[in-house]
Image: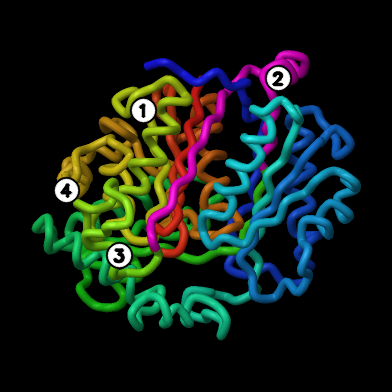
Amino acid sequence: MQKPNFKKVVLASAAVSGPERSVLGLGYRQFIMKTVLEALDKAKLTVKDVEVGSISYNERNITEGALGCVMADALGMVPIPFVSISQACAGGAICSDIIWNYLVSGRYKIGIVLGLNKPDNFDFRDAMGPIGNYCDYDFMLGFTHENYGHLRSEWYKQKYNYTDSVAAKWAWQCHWYARRNPMALANSGPMPTDEQLNDPGPAGYRARTATGRNMASCLVFVTEDVAEKLKIEPTYFNVSYAHRPVYIGNHFGYTGDERFAPYDMAEQPAIKIAAEEAYKIAGITADKIDIAQVHDLSSYDGMMALEWLGIVPPGQGGKFTAEGHTSIEGKCPTNTDGGAIAFAHSSAGGDFSSKIYENWLQLTGKAGERQVKNPKVTVAQAYGTHHSLDVVGILKK
C-alpha cells in the first residue's frame, strides 16, 4: 500500500483527568488547565512553544461564543490560532483532524488538542438539557438520543440474530479492564455479576451502556523533526473524518452517495470510509491492528465499530465478542481502559482523546496490569450524533 507524501505527525504526549461524576467548585478554565500543563510537561514543552491549538466542547453551561479565544487567553497562548469545535461526542476527534492537517501541511510544528466535558450534572444522561440531546425530534423522526441508540441496538440484534448475552459479555470485558485501570471509577467497586449484566430490565440496559462523566483532556502533537529534537520515541498519528446523513430515514438505502446505498442502521459505512483513508495514510491494513479503542455508547456500537473498521466481517462482532477476542489475550484487545461503559463517556471532553491516550500508554508500555503484549499498531474510533460523523485515528510505533 502506497502512502501519501505527508509530513509525519507524532503524539508527543497526552493527559486526561480522572473521570468524575461531578466537578464542583472549579470553573471550566481551572478544570482543564491542570491537564494541559501536565501534557506539555511530559513533552518538555511550555505554553510558549505551542503554535496552534483547538478545543472541543459539548456543554450547556459555557456562555462564551468564542471559546477558542477565551482558552488561548486563559492559557497564555495569545495570539496563536485556537480553533473551537462543538460537535457532539466526536468533537475531540475532529479537533485532532484539524491539528493533524495543520501539521502535515508544514505550516506549524507543535499543536495541542483540548477536550472539555463539565456540565456539573451528576448523571448527564439522565439530565439532558432543554437545548440538547432530548430535542432531536425534528430530524430523527421523533426519536430522542436515547431512544435512537436503543433502536439501533435492537435492529443490529435482530438482523444478526444476537441476544443481550453478547452485550453482557462486551460489558463484562470492559469492566475487567476498568478494574485494572487506576483512573476508572469502576475499579473501586465489585465486578458486576452475570445476572446484573444480563438483566432484561432497565438496570441491565444501563449496565450494558455508557456512563456519563466529566473529563478534561489534552493531546500534544508535533512534527517528526520536533520529536527528534525533543528525544521523544515517536508514536506516529494519522486520522480521517467522514460523514453519514443524520436523518434516520437516510440510514436505509441512501441514494445520495453510492457508498451508503447498500446499508441500513445496523451497518456503519462512514466508519469504513474514514478507516480506509486513515489506513492508507498510515500505510497499514486492518489485519495489522493490535489494539482497538472504539466508541461503545452501547455494547452493540462497539461491535459494529469493530466490523466497519475491518477487524471482523459485518455481523460477526457479536460472535467475536462472545468468543473472547476482545480480551487482553484475544485477537484484538478492545477498549482496554474500560471503554465508555466502564471508564467514561465524556462526550467532547475525551471520547476520542482518552482512546488515543490509552493507545499511547499501550504502545509505550505504561498500561500496567492491562498491558497488551508488544503492540505496534492501534486504532481509535469515535462518532457523534448517531454516526452522522465518524473519525478514525491510527497510532503506531
Confirm whether residue 179 shows in the render. no
Of pointers 1 and 2, the one earlier in the residue sequence = 2
The percent coordinates of residue 275 (x first, y second) are: 39, 37
- In the depicted structure, whether residue 7 falls above or below residue 330: above
Amino acid carrying mark 3 in the image: Asn
Amino acid carrying mark 2 in the image: Ala
Of pointers 4 and 1, the one earlier in the residue sequence = 1
**Chosen colour scheme:** rainbow
- The residue positioned 40% from the left and 65% from the top of the image is 246
Task: Kindly report the distance in space between the C-alpha atoms of the residues bearing marks 4 and 2.
Answer: 41 Å
**Span highlighted in magenta in the image:** 219-245
Task: Kindly report the distance in space between the C-alpha atoms of the residues bearing marks 4 and 1.
Answer: 19 Å
Amino acid carrying mark 4 in the image: Gly
- The residue positioned 34% from the left and 24% from the top of the image is 285
Of pointers 1 and 3, the one earlier in the residue sequence = 3
- Residue on which disc 2 sits: 227
Amino acid carrying mark 1 in the image: Ile
- Residue on which disc 1 sits: 289
Mark closer to the observer (4, 3): 3
Mark closer to the observer (1, 3): 3
In the image, taking residue 16 as reference, residue 128 lies left or right, namely: left
Q: Do the residues labelled 4 and 3 touch (CB within 8 Å)?
A: no
Mark closer to the observer (3, 2): 3
Q: Which mark is residue 250?
A: 3
Q: Which mark is residue 315?
A: 4
